[in-house]
Image: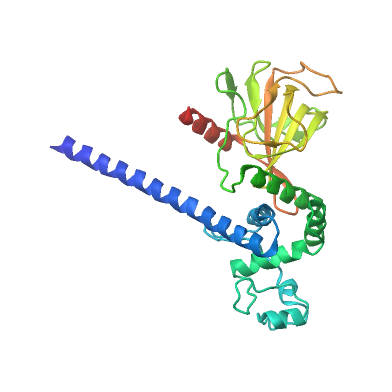
Amino acid sequence: MFNKLAYISVLIISISLILSQAVFAEEDTEIYDKRMALYKKTEAVTLVPWYYIAAIDQYERQVNKDLPDDQLVSIQIAPEKWYGIGNSSMISDARVIKMFNGIGKDGNGDGKAKRDNPEDILYTMSNDLIKTGPTVDDFKIALWNYYKRDLSVKTITNTAKVFQTFNDIHLTDRAFPVSLQHNYSFLNTWGDRRGFGGLRIHEGTDIFANYGTPVKSTTYGVIELMGWNLYGGWRIGIRDIFNIYHYYGHLNGYSDDIDVGQIVKPGDQLGSVGSSGYGPPGTSGKFPPHLHYGMYKDNGKTEWSFDPYPYLKKWERMEKQAN
């Protein structure tokens, strides 16, 4: 009798967990659908492509702190810029804002331009973006005028390219960076001391594998950098849609069909494992073959390295379960 009750209890718990996961998945998809609907609506009234609007919102979602997970729009425009200098009472009437040369606009037809209204925010941002013109170069100029930072402009335009290519903003697939069909091993080596080139810490995780083992993109993004690095040898840098720079070092070589500026998705082959680096171009064999995989977060002001090991373990598990 006890075993039967225990079995029923486990079954009930399991069913509850499955249902909970299904609800969370549905809620997760719902927020993306709502955002896409807003982006498309804003495109219709401003003629700014939805993927640029989405890319700006995505960028600000990563750089603005302590935002609720269910917040529809994350763009935050400074009060003085929104309401205009001199509008100290922050009157949201669109006519008053215009009188004080603020950029805030009414996006939903209620006569108010509210900094916390998603439609007003997107309509305002899109109108500010289109002021310099409708071309890609015009958008880049407008983004630089707004953010005053080259990396911000590059990140937003690259994210827009990814969204446009896949016609989606809900891009959550991931892949492990080396082929699971080959022998490999890795431990958490982030933060270890390194001596070559001066005392420094190890900004990544080393995944040991044989020469020629395929190296893959872990994420959706754009190839930002390729070429030789004194420490990393032949390396590739990919910026993803979450303001994270993924660094692949010590490669044996690159795949023939990849280049700087190319859009990649999880699983795309980038090259193969090698032992290049620790010297001038062509230096190889100074250490066992392995992939150095690093991750760097950008917060809109600075960029720093963080431990990729937990993510690698998660992506390894996800890929194994998918196969």
Q: Is residue 137 left or right of residue 105?
A: right
- Residue 241, visible in the rendered structure: no
- The quadrant in which residue 265 appears is top right
Q: The N terminus is located in which quarter?
A: top left
Q: Is residue 163 above or below residue 260?
A: below
Give the image location of residue 195, x and y in percent.
Answer: 77, 28
Relative depth, front residue between 79 and 223 = 223
Give the image location of residue 126, x and y in percent.
Answer: 71, 63
Give the image location of residue 283, x and y in percent.
Answer: 82, 19
Residue farthest toward the right in the current orientation of the protein: 280
Circle count: 0
* Residue for point 68% across, 25% down: 291
Q: Is residue 236 left or right of residue 119?
A: right
- Residue 287, visible in the rendered structure: yes
Give the image location of residue 89, x and y in percent.
Answer: 69, 84
Q: Is residue 28 above or below residue 45?
A: above
Relative depth, front residue between 215 and 201 = 215
- The quadrant in which residue 127 appears is bottom right
Q: How is the image coloured?
A: rainbow
